[in-house]
Amino acid sequence: MLQEQRRELLEQLTAVDAAIAALASAGTALAEPPAFESDAAADTAPGAVVATRVKPRRVLSDSHKQALVVGKRRAREIHEAAKGLAREKHDDSFVPAIGKRGDRQPPRLVKRPATK
């Protein structure tokens, strides 16, 4: 089926080439159509499959990913500041306090093992 379609298309192509040649010989100045590489390759090996090389997927480095995160954070902060929802920024030396339980009890939401 594909061979038949290919043959029909080649016949149409030869008819177009003949029409262009007739116009060129009649005195109409037409540029010569460029010969395609695929036509020559298709004529030489009709059953051969041509492999195409696919470029590898582009992956960002860790530094670029970090820069994107920082840029998004800055944009979000600017957007929130424009809305009036900005929080107070802490400097780099800020360390949040971690509370300790004096009575050594686990938090309330932790399941205790069932005793039997």
Image (tube, helix red, strand yellow):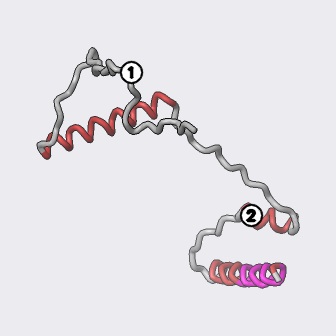
Task: Name the dominant secondary structure of the magenta segment.
Answer: helix
In the image, is residue 96 above or below residue 42? above
Magenta region includes residue 108: no
Is 84 displayed left or right of 97 in the figure?
Answer: left
Q: On residue 38, which mark appears?
A: 2
- Crowding at dot 1, Cα within 10 Å, few <14 / some 14-19 / many 20+, comes out as few
Is 40 displayed left or right of 116 in the figure?
Answer: right
> Which of the 4 quarters of the picture holds residue 74?
top left
Q: Residue furthest left?
A: 84
Q: Secondary structure at mark 2?
A: helix
Is 22 displayed left or right of 39 in the figure?
Answer: left
Q: Which residue is mark 1?
A: 104
Residue shown at the point (80%, 62%) measured from the top left: 41
* Quarter in which the C terminus is drawn: top right
In the image, is residue 107 above or below residue 91? below
Q: Give the residues in magenta.
A: 3-15
Q: Position of residue 23 (x, y in %)?
A: 63, 82
Residue shown at the point (26%, 40%) measured from the top left: 75
> Which of the 4 quarters of the picture holds residue 59?
top right
Residue shown at the point (83%, 61%) measured from the top left: 49
Magenta region includes residue 6: yes
In the image, is residue 61 above or below residue 96? below
Is 84 displayed left or right of 104 in the figure?
Answer: left
Q: Nearer the viewer, residue 85 or 56?
A: 85
Residue shown at the point (33%, 39%) measured from the top left: 72
Q: Position of residue 85 (x, y in %)?
A: 15, 42
Mark 2 and mark 1 residues within 8 Å of each other at the beta carbon = no
> Which of the 4 quarters of the picture holds residue 66?
top left
Amino acid type of the residue tagged 1 in the rendering: Arg
Amino acid type of the residue tagged 2 in the rendering: Ser
Of mark 2 and mark 1, the one earlier in the sequence is: 2
- Crowding at dot 2, Cα within 10 Å, few <14 / some 14-19 / many 20+, comes out as few
